[in-house]
Amino acid sequence: KNGTARGGGGGGGYLNRPLPSTPGPALRPRSPVNVPGEKPHKNRTTWYMSVDRNKSAELLKGTPNGTFLCRSSASKRKGEKGEEHTHTIDVVYKDPKNASCPPSNSDIKHLKVLRQNSKYGFSVPCSHKSLEDLVLHYSERSLGVHNHGLDTTLQAPINANNPWPVPP
């Protein structure tokens, strides 16, 4: 049964119009967050969180190598070449030489994400058009290119199975 759209006064031509019997594009249910066969990395809500460094470490502690999240940087410092430290990617990496040791906060590496000329990267010149592009790139390529002691990729977004709302 169709309802009726109601609104405040003032005209506008939309008052008391019947609601559509089938949902329009804005009313259709959202598609699943993780589409089978697609990387969860493509969905920012699986890896972006509004947390500080301590909370990030708490969330990541005990997770497998390559588990990561991205957070806003507490200190947005400018560099000599106009780059700004806007975000931090925290990634779990336990050196295989220390595999028998219990997990610790030292297993979490904090990577500064820079923005320069509206592009993102771990070093200048920045070449990724968005944070999403940066995350996708390093989901397939080793972070070791920027840190020789960090031979891993961004393998598993922290919320791949339970995405959180992301601020705009």
Image: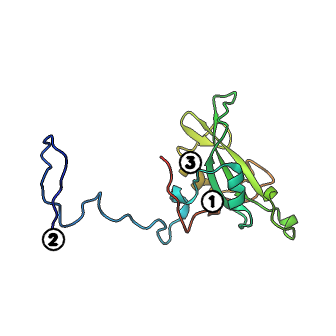
Indicate whether 21 appears above or below 89.
below
Q: Residue 45's spot in the image, x, y percent?
A: 52, 57
Q: Name the residue under label 1.
A: 140
The label shown at residue 155 is: none
Labels 3 and 1 touching (C-beta < 8 A):
no
Q: How is the image coloured?
A: rainbow
In this picture, residue 140 sits left or right of residue 54 = left
Front-most of residues 148 and 118: 118
Indicate whether 146 appears above or below 118.
below
Kindly identify the amino acid type of the residue bearing the numbered disc 2: Lys
Kindly identify the amino acid type of the residue bearing the numbered disc 3: Leu
Q: Residue 7's spot in the image, x, y percent?
A: 19, 49
In this picture, residue 27 sits left or right of residue 91 = left
Q: Mark 2 points at which residue?
A: 1
Which badge, 1 or 2, is on the more N-terminal residue? Answer: 2
> For the point 19% across and 46% down, which residue is it?
8
Which badge, 2 or 3, is on the more N-terminal residue? Answer: 2
On the image, which quarter does residue 19 sit in?
Answer: bottom left
Task: Judge the density around disc 2: few (<14), some (14-19), many (≥20) Cα neighbours within 10 Å.
Answer: few
Labels 2 and 3 touching (C-beta < 8 A):
no
Task: Judge the density around disc 3: few (<14), some (14-19), many (≥20) Cα neighbours within 10 Å.
Answer: some
- State which quarter of the image contains the N terminus: bottom left
> For the point 66% across and 50% down, which residue is it?
89
- Under tag 3, what secondary structure? helix
Q: Residue 26's spot in the image, x, y percent?
A: 29, 57
Q: Name the residue under label 3.
A: 131
> For the point 56% across and 39% down, which residue is it?
119
Indicate whether 64 appears above or below 119.
below
The CA distance from mark 3 to mark 1 is: 15 Å
Task: Judge the density around disc 1: few (<14), some (14-19), many (≥20) Cα neighbours within 10 Å.
Answer: few
The CA distance from mark 1 to mark 2 is: 50 Å
Kindly identify the amino acid type of the residue bearing the numbered disc 1: Glu
